[in-house]
Image (spheres, rainbow, N blue to C red):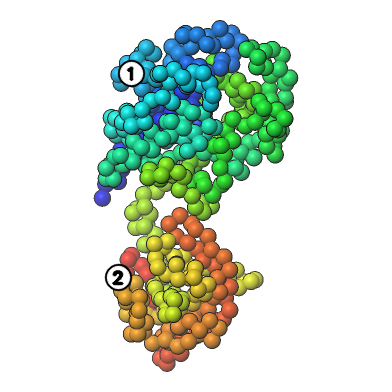
């Protein structure tokens, strides 16, 4: 079977303004481009009404000259990141600031939002159709954008989120790309603030421009923004989410992180780059993060698909192909067990080989159950499970209880059992060993759940003549004995 390479998995990041591609998704874009993914950026406005950071460029603020200047910054940043960029309205490969369809709407309540070409006034269906066209043009299999808050509440970001979700939702299921929102785990944000507090000295502003302070540095408090200082109130606070909401992550390499740093420097009107940190016009110092977090979005609702994500997946790698991993691990011989638990007023059983002793003090045993399996639901409800270690002579039982579609009711009728003394669960008469467990912890790990049980009792099988020197093993997709 041929598996897709990075070249087969184009990436599209959909953003509102120049610099968003770098500040929100730069690590992912540069790292994925470095791995060989075709990476594209669609920018919906030229940030016509952005504040200007650098005193030498502040004459551009509020003028018609700012848009073409920022288009040049966007081109330079894209070159640094190794990505292709297009502004909505431009012909592919033909940068033209005059062709931009929409204008920057400004922050919430800004008078710029009244302009008929402001992005917030775009027809939602029409904007979604334009984004869909870009998804189809680039062949994107991975789409990145903001979460439902727009990252920090900017109206244009929210509009882009809605349009991108609608665009992906409108595509046929068989061609629909994966959709992710750039977010920051709360623990990473706290760690970044501590780093800034330890490495950056605050500087009182020495200038002002249009009523805002300039040429200073605000070091945010590690415990959170100071409400007494509005400029410190974290502009990215809404993009900071509970760790369990963050399902994927991308870690930069030395070269991709250097590319992101160069891209930030390219956006000179918006960002000042320093050694390990950067700041925007609010003067708040941010650590140059070595990684980015992402949450999978549900195209139907546009909201983050939450859940226990103690184990995060990489966004588009590096990760081994699942089929190749399964084939490799099939070379590892494992013992075959039968798990039993209660299912309503009855019992449920399944064959399993992912059983692991966890601890001797206390005595703990772990089982891994596919999240799609009914057995996991039953263990959740009953709070108990039993493990039966099979001999080779019980192969027929192992094969029967691993048969897909077997009936839930009566599945142990053909298997000799007796009632366990601690839990009352059925234990296999032919088992080499048994363990009765009460669940004390469970954790979702990817597509499986690890149930950890306190072992309340262990025993041997009760059948005579069972050869305890010949256990049943699972190897290369087959059950077999050791002889």
> Is any atom of residue 288 visible in this view?
yes
Judge the density around disc 1: few (<14), some (14-19), many (≥20) Cα neighbours within 10 Å.
some
Q: Measured along the vertical axis of the image, is residue 344 above or below residue 88? A: below
The residue at the point 66 percent across, 35 percent down is 193
Which residue is painted at 45% across and 13% down in the image?
A: 67
106 or 414: which is nearer to us?
106
Kind of element beneath mark 2: loop
Packing grade of label 2 (10 A; few <14, some 14-19, many >=20) is: few
Specify the label residue 405 is tagged with: 2
Number of dots carrying numbers: 2
* The quarter of the displayed image where residue 414 is located: bottom left
Judging by the rendered image, the residue that carries numbered circle 1 is: 90
Q: Look at the picture and state if 149 lies above or below 95.
A: below
Secondary structure under tag 1 reads loop
> Cα distance, mark 2 to mark 1?
54 Å
Quadrant of the frame with the C terminus: bottom left
Nearer to us in this view, 217 or 47: 47
Q: Earlier in the sequence, mark 2 or mark 1?
A: 1
Q: Nearer the viewer, mark 2 or mark 1?
A: 1
Query: Which of the 4 image quarters holds residue 75?
Result: top left
Residue 232: percent from the left, percent from the top? Answer: 66, 28
């Amino acid at each position: 079977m041929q598996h897709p390479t990075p070249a087969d998995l184009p990436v599209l990041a959909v953003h509102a303004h120049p610099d968003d591609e770098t500040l929100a998704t730069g690590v992912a874009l540069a790292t994925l481009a470095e791995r060989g993914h075709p990476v594209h950026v669609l920018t919906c406005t030229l940030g016509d009404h952005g504040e200007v950071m650098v005193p030498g460029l502040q004459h551009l603020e509020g003028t018609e000259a700012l848009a073409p200047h920022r288009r040049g910054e966007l081109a330079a940043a894209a070159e640094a990141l190794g990505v292709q960029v297009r502004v909505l309205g431009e012909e592919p490969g033909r940068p033209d600031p005059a062709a931009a369809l929409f204008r920057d709407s400004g922050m919430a309540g800004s008078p710029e939002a009244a302009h008929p070409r402001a992005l917030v006034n775009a027809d939602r269906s029409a904007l979604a159709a334009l984004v869909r066209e870009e998804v189809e043009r680039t062949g994107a299999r991975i789409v990145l954008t903001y979460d439902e808050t727009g990252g920090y509440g900017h109206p244009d970001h929210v509009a882009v989120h809605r349009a991108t979700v609608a665009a992906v939702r409108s595509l046929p299921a068989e061609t629909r790309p994966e959709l992710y929102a750039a977010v920051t785990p709360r623990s990473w944000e706290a760690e970044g603030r501590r780093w800034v507090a330890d490495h950056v000295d605050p500087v009182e502003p020495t200038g002002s421009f249009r009523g805002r302070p300039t040429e200073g540095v605000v070091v945010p408090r590690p415990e959170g923004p100071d409400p007494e200082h509005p400029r410190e109130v974290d502009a990215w606070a809404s993009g900071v989410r509970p760790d369990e909401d963050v399902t994927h992550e991308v870690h930069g390499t030395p070269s991709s992180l250097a590319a992101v740093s160069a891209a930030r420097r390219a956006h000179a009107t918006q960002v000042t780059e320093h050694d390990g940190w950067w700041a925007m016009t609010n003067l708040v110092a941010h650590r140059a993060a070595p990684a980015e977090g992402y949450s999978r979005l549900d195209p139907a609702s546009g909201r983050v698909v939450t859940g226990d994500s103690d184990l995060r997946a990489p966004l588009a790698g590096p990760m081994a192909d699942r089929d190749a991993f399964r084939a490799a691990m099939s070379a590892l011989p494992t013992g075959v067990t039968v798990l039993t638990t209660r299912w309503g007023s009855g019992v449920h059983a399944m064959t399993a080989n992912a059983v692991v002793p966890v601890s001797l003090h206390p005595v703990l045993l772990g089982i891994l159950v596919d999240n799609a399996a009914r057995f996991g639901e039953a263990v959740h409800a009953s709070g108990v499970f039993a493990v039966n270690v099979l001999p080779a002579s019980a192969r027929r039982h192992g094969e029967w209880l691993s048969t897909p579609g077997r009936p839930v009711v009566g599945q142990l009728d053909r298997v000799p059992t007796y009632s366990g003394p601690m839990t009352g669960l059925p234990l296999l008469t032919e088992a080499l060993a048994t363990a009765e467990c009460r669940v004390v912890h469970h954790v979702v790990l990817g597509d499986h759940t690890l149930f950890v049980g306190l072992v309340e009792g262990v025993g041997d099988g009760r059948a005579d003549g069972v050869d305890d020197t010949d256990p049943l093993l699972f190897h290369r997709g087959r059950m077999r004995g050791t002889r």
